[in-house]
């Protein structure tokens, strides 16, 4: 029987080089993205499973840009044990307590979640795919904690109405917020300004943004590599 009490954690070396140190009590577990583990105490038991089941795992992998599997780290001893998790990019980490809310994560943002959280996939629409954000999003609901990371710094913002976010800067958002795609300006300014298409958000809730994007880094480095 899993211990579903709140996970103890702290974040080190944030905001630039953040990683999560999670303390698991006896019979407690945490579920993490494949490849997120940096280190763990030798007595922790790790198992691998399809993320959200076979069908959800396949959707995550081939239509959502996520891993097919997740790893479950469980403490089967009678003493607290630690597991250290991180993300592949340089940046900050956010831990969100759901408290009955539902949140969606953009591809690549997910790191881990604790007990009391249900992970699934949600159809994001062709507008999301057209903006390069994938057809499906990871969706989390329940009363536990979700850990996610971003490239660079992470900022939290409450919106009410319409709000524009440049492509790839949106990390997470409340499920009641609708996402669309629009030109950043008129036809000429959108393409010659370098902004192109943007995410047009509409609704009331909280969003999380990352200050950098890997696509921007690739674009910056490409002409310098010969």
Image: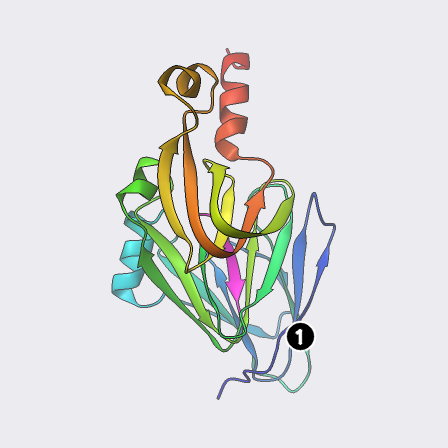
Label 1 crowd (10 A; few <14 / some 14-19 / many >=20):
many
Q: Which residue is pictured at 62% across the width and 47% down the height? A: 154
| Residue 121 lies in the magenta-colored region | no
Colour approach in the figure: rainbow
Give the residue at the far right of this rendering. 13
- Asked if residue 42 lies left or right of residue 57, the reply is right
Residues drawn in magenta? 108-113
Q: Please tell me whether residue 125 is drawn above or below residue 23 in the rendered image.
A: above
Q: Residue furthest front?
A: 161
- Is residue 58 visible in the rendered image? The answer is yes
Residue 212 sits above or below residue 95 on the image: above
Q: Is residue 66 visible?
A: no
Counting the numbered discs, the total is 1
Q: Main secondary structure of the magenta part?
A: strand
* Horizontal side of residue 214 vs 23, given as left or right: left
Q: Which residue is mark 1?
A: 81
Q: Position of residue 29 (x, y in %)?
A: 54, 76
Q: Position of residue 212 (x, y in %)?
A: 58, 35
Q: Residue furthest top?
A: 226
The image shows residue 142, relative to residue 1, as above or below, that is above
Secondary structure of residue under mark 1:
strand
Residue nearest the viewer, comparing 45 with 156:
156
Is residue 110 magenta-colored?
A: yes
Q: Nearer the viewer, residue 47 or 99?
A: 99
Residue at 59% over, 82% down: 5
Image position, residue 226 (x, y; %): 50, 10
Rendered residue at 48%/54% (across/down): 173
Locate residue 119: give its quadrant: bottom left
Relative image position of residue 19 (x, y in whole percent): 66, 54
């Amino acid at each position: 029987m899993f211990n579903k009490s709140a996970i103890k954690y702290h974040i080190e070396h944030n905001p630039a080089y953040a990683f999560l140190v999670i303390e698991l009590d006896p019979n407690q577990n945490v579920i993490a993205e494949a490849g997120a583990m940096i280190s763990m105490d030798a007595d922790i038991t790790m198992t691998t499973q399809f993320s959200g089941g076979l069908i959800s795992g396949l959707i995550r992998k081939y239509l959502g840009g996520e891993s097919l599997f997740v790893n479950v780290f469980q403490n089967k001893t009678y003493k607290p044990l630690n597991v250290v998790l991180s993300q592949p990019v340089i940046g900050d980490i956010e831990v969100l307590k759901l408290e009955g809310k539902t949140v969606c994560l953009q591809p690549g943002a997910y790191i881990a979640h604790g007990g009391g959280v249900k992970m699934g996939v949600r159809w994001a629409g062709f507008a999301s795919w057209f903006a390069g954000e994938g057809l499906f999003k990871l969706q989390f609901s329940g009363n536990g904690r979700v850990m996610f990371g971003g490239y660079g710094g992470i900022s939290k913002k409450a919106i009410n109405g319409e709000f524009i976010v440049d492509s790839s800067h949106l990390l997470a958002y409340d499920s009641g917020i609708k996402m669309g795609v629009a030109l950043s300006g008129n036809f000429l300014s959108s393409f010659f300004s370098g902004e192109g298409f943007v995410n047009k958000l509409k609704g009331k809730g909280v969003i999380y943004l990352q200050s950098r994007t890997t696509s921007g880094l690739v674009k910056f480095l490409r002409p310098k590599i010969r």
